[in-house]
Image (cartoon, rainbow, N blue to C red):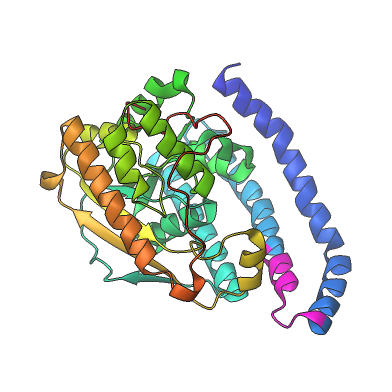
Amino acid sequence: MSRLLLRILRRLVLVPVVLTVCLAWLIALPALMLPAALYSLLFERRARILRVFSFMTVYFLLEIVSLVVLLGLWLASGMGLRVQSARSQAAHFAYMRWWLCQVETAAARLFRLRIEIEDPPAPRSGPVLVFSRHAGPGNSLMLVATLMLRYRRLPRIVMLAKLQWDPFFDIIGNRLPNRFITHRPGDRDRSLRAIAELASVTPSEGAFVLFPEGRDFTVKLRARAIDSLRRKGFASYADKAEKMLRVLPPRHGGVMAAVTAAPHADVIFVAHTVLEDVGPFGELWRRIPFERPVTAHYWRIPAGEVPREQEALIEWLYEWWGRIDKWIDDRIPPQDRPGPLPLGPVPSGPPEEGAAPQPQ
């Protein structure tokens, strides 16, 4: 099935389904909030259920508003004929900035989620390639929000194709200069071409965004990735990966494609803390609302200091990922540290595709 046909089917099916779910939630909200309020009043003073229900309500309202606004922008662009025009692109970026602002405000007020950047770099012009650790959609949104709201950058994001099952991300993500990729081996060359193309045209006010780990960090996935490195003959990289307890081994294929296609761009590495000390969902639930802020650090490397040869780049990437791992680990309070992470392979289950640093 062609990607265009699949996109049409997604929107014909998912948009009505999502709208129905959102409207059903809003209709049922009074009946849901009353028992939630009583439960919070009687049994838990942190009002976690009320906070989560309120955030879900904000998100569902934004989903409805977004689909209406995006329909209006589509009509204004001549039913999509001029959606790539400068005026249409500016309108979509403006809406994305507004949407991120609403989500960030809701998270701050309801969950007390705060973001503090250590030694924030002064804004400087010029295209940048942003390589960040990956710890879930929430972390990715925080990074994009920081780039758009604080640094006024226009992001160009490499995302997993599965995010297109959310109609908002599907529509706005495909209208703006982003790329959706998969980790299937048969799609590797096409994905690398898409990454290179996107990075090569990053403007001075833009920010190319890639997550070299490729997936959210989990203890099990980390162990499988290390096992995969060893089985494929990359023992030295497996040794390096074993020393990194809070991140996955970085994939170099997309990074290599980006830095080769944009030799004029500086590189920014991003580390952030969020849930390293939390563990299972029950512990996350207990932490709401958050008492400590999310801490982030941005390192900017001039283009002239970025390796261009593959082997040197892999070594350089692992060195930076080790630095990011240490930065994260140093910021976990001793009383909140989880138990020791496994260093060796996980014997059960197939290895994750593309976990080794060979071309990906």
Q: In the figure, residue 45 lies in which quadrant? A: bottom right
Q: Is residue 199 visible?
A: no
Q: Which residues are magenta?
A: 43-55
| Viewer-closest of 335 and 125 | 335
Residue 34 position in % (x across, y down): 86, 74
Image coordinates for residue 160, horizontal then vertical, percent = 50, 37
Magenta segment main secondary structure: helix
**Residue 49 in sight here:** yes
Identify which residue is drawn at 32% across, 31% down: 253
204 w.r.t. 106: above or below? above
Residue at the image position 23 percent from the left and 67 percent from the top: 122
Task: Determine if the magenta segment contains residue 49.
Answer: yes
**17, 88: nearer the viewer:** 17
Give left or right: position of 165 versus 326. right
* Residue 121 or residue 76, whichever sits in front: 121
Residue 150 in the image, given as x and y percentages of width and height: 36, 65
Left or right: 208 with respect to 105?
left
Q: Residue at x 53, y 56 (%)?
A: 138
Which residue occupies the extreme left position in the image? Answer: 304
Figure check: 332 above or below 170: below
Quarter occupied by the C terminus: top left
Instruction: Give the answer, above or below, for where 282 lies relative to 1.
Output: below
Q: Quadrant of the N terminus?
A: top right
- Tell whether position 252 is magenta: no
**Tally of marks:** 0
Where is residue 29? Give x, y as percent.
82, 64
